Image (cartoon, coloured by chain):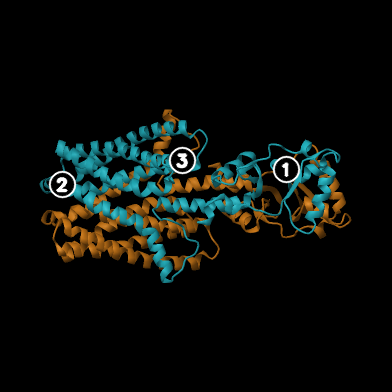
Chain colours: A orange, B cyan
Amino acid sequence: MPHSRLETFVTKKGFILLNGGITVKEALAHWKKVAKPTPVSHVVYVVDDSNRLVGAVELKDLLLDEPDKKLSSVMRADFPSIRLKAPISQAVSLAVEKEITEMAVVDDNGELVGMVFTDRLLDALNWMNTQNVYRLAGILRAREKVDLRLPSLVRGMYDRMVWLLFSVIVGVFVAGGILKHFETAIITVPAVTFFIPVLMGFGGNIGTQTSTVFVRMLSNKEAGVGRRLLKLLTADLITGGLLGIVLGLVTAVSSLLFFTDFRLALVLFISMMMISVVAILVGFMIPYLSHKKGWDPAIVSAPVVTSIKDVLALLIYFLFIRLLL
Amino acid sequence: MPHSRLETFVTKKGFILLNGGITVKEALAHWKKVAKPTPVSHVVYVVDDSNRLVGAVELKDLLLDEPDKKLSSVMRADFPSIRLKAPISQAVSLAVEKEITEMAVVDDNGELVGMVFTDRLLDALNWMNTQNVYRLAGILRAREKVDLRLPSLVRGMYDRMVWLLFSVIVGVFVAGGILKHFETAIITVPAVTFFIPVLMGFGGNIGTQTSTVFVRMLSNKEAGVGRRLLKLLTADLITGGLLGIVLGLVTAVSSLLFFTDFRLALVLFISMMMISVVAILVGFMIPYLSHKKGWDPAIVSAPVVTSIKDVLALLIYFLFIRLLL
């Protein structure tokens, strides 16, 4: 989509570029001449003789500074700039951190190519977030328009189908295959069947929670993400262990209301604990590995995490059934 | 959280307020006096005698307009302003639509209380989106800090537990209850068990996709949301019907590889179609009803949609088993 790159949001006119050698007075005069017929930014960008961006002066500084000083001596040399190829999230961080409403955009040689206003970034961020939310739900892309004509409906179907088809195939061949493998256990103790939905649901939900947190963190590419990652994983695993104990107890005790089978209750309790920890590990590993591979964590995670934890939850449950029942 | 309201992002100083009766020259002189010692916005807000906001003049207009004109005659009377109590999303739409990097904030009486810069809105939007993504995963709130101390871990556990507990209880008592009710079918034809994961997963995934789309739409409170809603629902139901047919066929044909039971294949095909349409209706109804009730669609939808469609998928499947098998 055109929206996903910073480039789309760069304005290439409406700003003034001046050489650092001229004076404040000259700059102001030039500004007035240009600004009269066309709307321009209130920031004047300062370049050196080879046209590389060296700083910027705000219009208010031109008004308040001494008229005879050179631009290069009154400009802010640290005026925030960003590379044209930078991700939008980096432009957002820069604007928030430096508290600016516009920033200079430079190419790889440091030459000014334009600027980005924060209102365009708001637009970009909104779009990006819609895309991310859609991807978490396994929809390939958000479309701008709703359209009831056939080609549009087919495209919309394709956007949703890819991941649904994947999960149906995993569901039939892997989850179904596991259940077929443990057929005798099901026939011997049909009660085990009744807890398949709750165990699969639990694994799925807790795994999704974890992957959501990590996808968000990795997409934002926060500074110092490495150390935070380990800390967050540790916190998540402890939380997950506790959740597994509490919800495992709830499930085990509830099962006794249906079937007074203490060994089944024990299997449920242990399975819930194991599923919790394993689902959290999967919920972490998948976004982490996609990030390392340079793939967008959001597009890979939700579908894959959901399918893997479905299968693992079943496997864990039936392994404990075989061991303990 | 303090972050969720526009109020938090309003700047109450650093801007200049002038009466519309003074001249451009006087305004510029005043601006220079104030701007010298403290940083101020490049927009001058214009108020009437009862201090109500009537317009604004940009610094560049003060420089370019005739010095003897009155502010009230050179100001933009339509300078964008927003009510203090407006949702952040509305401020974002305003900034994007009007292409502005700051806006005036007024109270219910039209008195200026401050302004919002778009870099603060970027911060707000980023935070809001993180909250929304977390809520979709059934996490009550995003916390700023990761902390390995016990009180923090317990709070993090609570944030995730509420919805997990809800889904565990629904899973045991409702989904488990349904399976117990259809116990004889399971004992008679154990093959039906093998397709429980794929049917529940399918209902869940397709329902989540739909609710994601509608939650996003309703949260953004787009203009003309009513007509778009109906159109999107129609498109979604057609798409869902088609997806149900295609994936129902995939499931039915695959089932024949495990069990050469044509009636089971027919049950699977019809169930998938029904589940698809019902899951989409639920995925639409829940966010729509929470929106109507004035609740945040994102906080209610994911957990409730997932649980309801789990239960409905099972019910639909076993009803067709009873009817056709």
Q: Residue furthest right?
A: A68
Report the residue marked by disc 2.
B181
Give the residue number, with chain letter if any, for mark 1: B47
Q: Tell whether B233 sits left or right of A114.
A: left
Rate crowding at label 1 as few (under 14), some (14 to 19) or many (20 or more) other CA atoms within 10 Å: many
Q: Are marks 1 and 3 on the same chain?
A: yes
Q: Earlier in the sequence, mark 3 or mark 2?
A: 2
Dots 2, 1 in contact, CB < 8 A: no
| Crowd tier of the residue under label 2, counting other residues whose Cα lies within 10 Å: few below 14, some 14–19, many 20 or above | few
Label 3: element kind: helix
Picture residue at 47% right of the left edge, 60% below the top: B143
State the separation of the CA atoms marked 2 and 1.
71 Å
Q: Which mark is residue B218?
A: 3
From the viewer's perspective, is the residue at label 1 or at label 3 nearer?
1
Q: Given the image, what chain letter belongs to the residue carrying mark 2?
A: B
Q: Amino acid at mark 1?
A: Val
